[in-house]
Amino acid sequence: MKFSKLKTTALAVTLAAFAGEAMATEWNVSTWGKRRAFTEHLEKVAELVSAKTNGEFTMNISYGGLSNEKENLDGIQIGAFEMAQICAGYHEDKNPTLTVLELPFLGVSTLAEEVAVSDALYAHPAVKADLARWNATLLMPSPMPQYNLVGTGEPRETLDAFKGMRVRATGGLGSAFSAVGAVPTSVTSSEAYTAMESGVLDTVAFAQHAHLSFRTIDLATWWTENLNPGTVNCPIVVNTDAYESLPAAHREALDSSVPEAIAFYIENYENKVIAQWNKILAEKNVKKVQIPEAELAAFREAAGGPVRAAWMEKMQAQGVPAQELYDTVTQALADFRAKQTN
């Protein structure tokens, strides 16, 4: 009886061990570059999920080791990894519905507003269906401030000076610069420094953290402080099958961590990145260029409406409900601002 009892106890312990092992979840996460403000919500989500599940749900974040940035959506589709950061402008044909957020001059001015319009768009049925083609579910945005240019040589302070300017700009931003005679190129963020250093590019359009992380600021003699033509949309997506197969407790840990991670991201950007940016501009004696309001108005007129109209025509030809998506974004922005004033 004693032996039998020992065997029973041992079996119970073994089964419990297997059960515990079965409950463990390990995800691989693909992004690029290096850890920076742009990836802090990924890092925070991984930290929070692990803490909430007592280490049962862990995430391994890879900076370029799993895929390059233009192929992350493909990797998600085939299940090469469970989570990834993507940018709509890197593959407009793969995620056309997301490109509405890359249109120039949408009027979004803060990171919180960027989150609000992104969340509203991601919830739209057409967007969900678009990403479902890649077995992808949108998890959260990577809110970024308005892009501005860094450049070498004489500052470009007028639209005439933009003519012929070789600029790193993707998606709708590229179209905006093209509308005023510039020559956009969609090299990846990782390639921007080399392209600028070699003279392939005159200027690079990035948010502040990217100018810092990809060192384009090291080559710059000037920066446009107020051009603010728009930004790019780079959400975090998860493999739908992996997400839906999560144990309920792990899925709850992931879902509940998203708002916390976004809040951490915004606080980090506004309190640390901007302070670091201003310090480095001063250290490197980079000239802050203020584009005259008349030039900005001319830029908005030349690029805003025409680029949006061309985008809508192109999207509608593909069966994308372009006007509906655009209205979703503008209404979300108006609703968010109304709440802030109440």
Image (cartoon, helix red, strand yellow):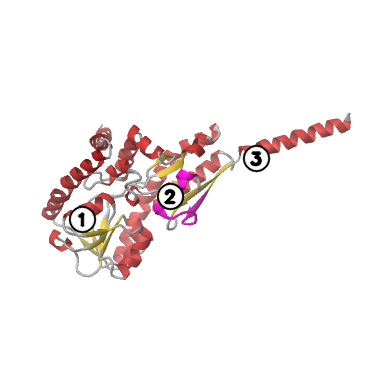
Front in this rendered view, residue 249 or 285: 249
Name the residue that disc number 2 marks.
72
Q: Is residue 13 left or right of residue 201?
A: right
Type of amino acid at the residue the image marks with label 2: Asn
Tell me if residue 71 is in the magenta stretch.
yes
Tell me if residue 73 is in the magenta stretch.
yes
- Give the secondary structure at mark 2: helix
* Closer mark to the observer between disc 2 and disc 3: 2
- Residue 76 visible from this viewpoint: yes
Residue at (23, 43) in percent of width and height = 314
Name the residue that disc number 1 marks.
177
In the displayed orientation, state which residue is furthest to the top. 1
Task: Look at the picture and state if 198 lies above or below 37.
Answer: below
The numbered disc on residue 261 is none
Name the residue that disc number 3 marks.
21
Q: CA distance from mark 3 to mark 1?
A: 54 Å
Type of amino acid at the residue the image marks with label 1: Phe
Magenta range is 60-78
- Give the secondary structure at mark 3: helix
Q: CA distance from mark 2 to mark 3?
A: 29 Å
How crowded is the residue under tag 1: few (<14 C-alpha within 10 Å), some, or many (20+)? many
Q: Position of residue 52 (x, y in %)?
A: 54, 39
Residue at (47, 50) in percent of width and height = 30
